[in-house]
C-alpha cells in the first residue's frame, strides 16, 4: 500500500476526482486504476454521500474508456456501475434510461446500459443470492454423500444352498425392528434440504425500469440509428431486458400488469 503511486481512495468524492483526471495528467493510469478498484466495495459500504454522488459517478463510468489498456478494466467498470444501480436504483436508472439510452451514443453503450440494468434487477430481486445458496447446498449434499459408507448393514457368512429371498425377508423385518427401537433426535430435520427465502427489493422499482424504456423506445423508433442494422440488436435487447424485469418482479404487486403490458 505504501509503495503505490496513488493511495487507495476512501471517499466517493475522491474516486470521482480520480476518474475525471485527463490522460495527460501525471500518473493518470494510477489514478484511474485506484478509483476503479476502490469503487465497488466503497459504494456497497453505503457512505452518507452516496445519494448525492451516485449519478455523477454513473455518468463518468458509463463513458469511461480504457485508454491505458488496464487489466480487468471492463470487469471493474461493470461491477462499479452495477453497485451504483443496486444501491441507488431510482436515480441511476432514471439517468441511464431518460438521458442516455436513446440519445446520441454508440450502440455498444446502449447495450451496456440494458445489460447493467438486467444484472442489477437480478441482484435486487435476490436471484443471485438464491443461486449461490443453492450451489452451496448442493456442494454440501455432495460432500455428505461422499463421506457416507459404501457398505451398510450386517455382514455374515452365507451357507451353501440358502434361499436369498428368505434372507431378504428376515433382513427387512430386522431392519424395521431396529428402526422402531432406535430413538432419533431431530429426525427429518435436514438442513441441506431447506429452501431459503430472500426479500425481493426489485418489485417496488420494477415499473421505474420498465415503462421509461418502453416510452423511450417508442419515441426513438423512427430515429436514423433505429433504422439501421443495429436497430434490430437494440430492439432484441430491449425485449430481453423487459422480460428480465418482469421475471425479477416475481409475485410482487404489479408484476401481472407488467407481464400483460409486455
Image (tube, helix red, strand yellow):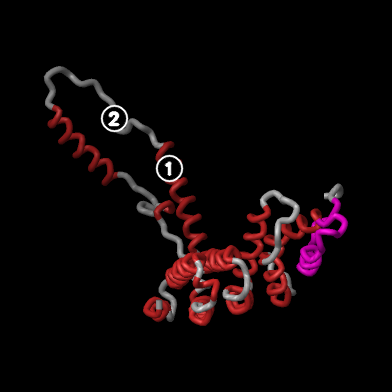
Q: What is the spatial separation of the Cα atoms under label 2 and label 1, in whole angstroms? A: 25 Å
Which quarter of the rendering shows the C terminus? bottom left
Give the main secondary structure, helix, strand or loop, of the magenta stretch: loop
Q: Nearer the viewer, residue 185 or 14?
A: 14
Indicate which label's residue lies in the foreground, 2 or 1: 1
Residue 61, compared with residue 203, is above or below; it is: above
Q: Circle 1: is it few (<14), some (14-19), or many (20+) Cα within 10 Å? A: few
Residue 234 place in picture, x, y as percent: 50, 68
Q: Nearer the viewer, residue 82 or 250?
A: 82
Q: Which mark is residue 154?
A: 2
Q: Which residue is mark 1?
A: 142
Q: Is residue 195 magenta?
A: no
Point out the stretch of residues depicted in magenta. 5-28
Q: Is residue 18 magenta?
A: yes
Residue at (32% x, 33% y) in the render: 152
Residue at (29% x, 33% y) in the render: 153
Residue at (60% x, 78% y) in the render: 94
* Secondary element at image label 2: loop
Residue at (55% x, 65% y) in the render: 111
Residue 94, compared with residue 248, is above or below; it is: below
Amino acid at each position: 500500500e505504501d509503495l503505490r503511486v496513488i493511495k487507495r481512495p476512501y471517499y466517493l468524492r475522491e474516486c470521482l476526482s480520480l476518474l475525471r483526471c485527463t490522460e495527460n495528467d501525471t500518473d493518470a493510469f494510477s489514478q484511474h486504476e485506484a478509483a476503479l478498484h476502490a469503487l465497488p466495495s466503497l459504494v456497497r459500504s453505503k457512505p452518507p454521500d452516496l445519494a448525492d454522488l451516485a449519478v455523477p459517478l454513473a455518468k463518468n463510468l458509463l463513458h469511461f474508456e480504457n485508454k491505458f489498456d488496464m487489466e480487468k478494466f471492463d470487469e471493474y467498470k461493470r461491477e462499479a456501475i452495477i453497485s451504483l444501480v443496486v444501491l441507488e436504483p431510482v436515480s441511476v436508472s432514471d439517468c441511464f434510461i431518460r438521458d442516455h439510452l436513446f440519445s446520441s451514443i454508440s450502440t455498444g453503450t446502449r447495450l451496456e446500459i440494458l445489460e447493467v440494468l438486467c444484472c442489477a434487477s437480478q441482484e435486487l430481486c435476490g436471484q443471485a443470492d438464491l443461486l449461490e445458496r443453492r450451489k452451496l447446498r448442493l456442494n454440501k449434499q455432495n460432500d455428505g454423500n461422499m463421506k457416507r459408507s459404501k457398505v451398510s448393514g450386517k455382514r455374515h457368512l452365507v451357507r451353501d444352498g440358502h434361499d436369498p429371498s428368505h434372507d431378504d425377508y428376515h433382513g427387512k423385518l430386522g431392519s424395521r425392528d431396529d428402526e422402531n427401537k432406535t430413538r432419533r433426535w431431530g429426525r427429518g430435520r435436514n438442513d441441506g434440504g431447506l429452501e431459503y427465502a430472500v426479500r425481493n427489493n426489485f418489485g417496488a422499482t420494477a415499473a421505474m425500469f420498465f415503462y421509461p424504456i418502453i416510452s423511450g423506445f417508442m419515441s426513438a423508433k423512427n430515429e436514423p440509428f433505429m433504422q439501421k442494422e443495429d436497430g434490430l440488436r437494440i430492439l432484441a435487447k430491449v425485449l430481453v431486458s423487459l422480460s428480465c424485469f418482469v421475471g425479477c418482479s416475481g409475485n410482487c404487486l404489479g408484476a401481472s400488469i407488467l407481464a400483460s403490458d409486455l
